Image (cartoon, helix red, strand yellow):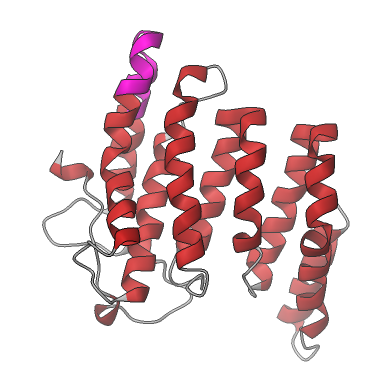
Amino acid sequence: QDLLVVQYVPSALLPVQAEVSLTKIAVKGSLKADDQAYLYEALASLVTSTKPEEHRPLLEMLLKGPAQTLSEILTGASRAGSDVAGCAGWSGRSIEAIATVSKPFTVQHASTAPAWEAVLLLVAKILEKFVQQLGREIGLWRAALFLCRRMVEVLGDRFLDILDTFLPFLYATNDQTELAELTIFAHHLVCQYQKKMAPYLQKWLPQIFMRPYAVWQQLPEQSEQLKREKLELGAALLQ
């Protein structure tokens, strides 16, 4: 069980580099992030191989650690104290663990839906709490998008109302690469849900289109790299 604990890493000990995700930092005496992810996924696969009536209680046991971490961060009871960036990064790693657990699950595992919905409520509150800490180096934004992508496959139509609470926080980013990824995700949602997505698309159209477009307009023209990024972002908007 100790191998499944998502470790807190103080932000003061970490270099601030946009290219380095906090999820890749190794803590002495614990598993590397990739090895822990493999363990979570393997255990989740074992859960899906059990009897259907055992899926939900076993899943709740597997999600208990990351979910408890998120709860403690929300209530201020975690050992991270006032380390806001450290708490945000810790939240991101916990959310990534939750998303990894979801990999073997699909809409066919309908009995597990309440367990996923309960943990998604925690994640939404975490995003609201750390909406100003969604920089690429923190890893929280990317973990949240990873979880959203997985929940489309796991919850199906039941995810739409929950997604409605996630979108304003996901679109809080100013990073053009992340906005391009988010625009591609929005396109995936339309393809997946089709007409069921219409009311949400109408509600969030200013964010889905105008938010990336506003960032696109601000990109300078001096370097070839930035020109390429503008082209990629524009292509994503037109999908």
Residue 50 among those drawn in magenta: yes
Lateral position of residue 57 relative to residue 200, left or right? left
Expressed as whole percent of the image width and height from the top left, the position of residue 96 reads 41, 50
Residue 109 visible from this viewpoint: no
The residue located at (46%, 68%) in the rendering is 130
Expressed as whole percent of the image width and height from the top left, the position of residue 116 reads 46, 34
Lateral position of residue 142 relative to residue 157, left or right? left
Expressed as whole percent of the image width and height from the top left, the position of residue 157 reads 67, 29
Q: Does the magenta stretch mainly form a helix, a strand or a loop?
A: helix
The residue located at (60%, 43%) in the rendering is 162
The residue located at (74%, 56%) in the rendering is 183
Q: In the depicted view, which residue is nearer to us: 215 or 157?
A: 157
Magenta range is 44-57
Q: In the depicted view, which residue is nearer to us: 50 or 195?
A: 195
Q: In the depicted view, which residue is nearer to us: 125 or 43?
A: 125
Expressed as whole percent of the image width and height from the top left, the position of residue 70 reads 34, 53
Lateral position of residue 177 relative to residue 61, left or right? right
State the residue lying farthest toward the right. Answer: 238
Q: How many marks?
A: 0
The residue located at (52%, 69%) in the rendering is 131
Q: Quadrant of residue 63?
A: top left
Residue 111 among those drawn in magenta: no
Q: Is residue 20 above or below residue 144?
A: below
Q: Quadrant of residue 206?
A: bottom right
State the residue lying farthest toward the bottom. Answer: 222
Q: In the depicted view, which residue is nearer to us: 147 or 181?
A: 147
Residue 11 visible from this viewpoint: yes
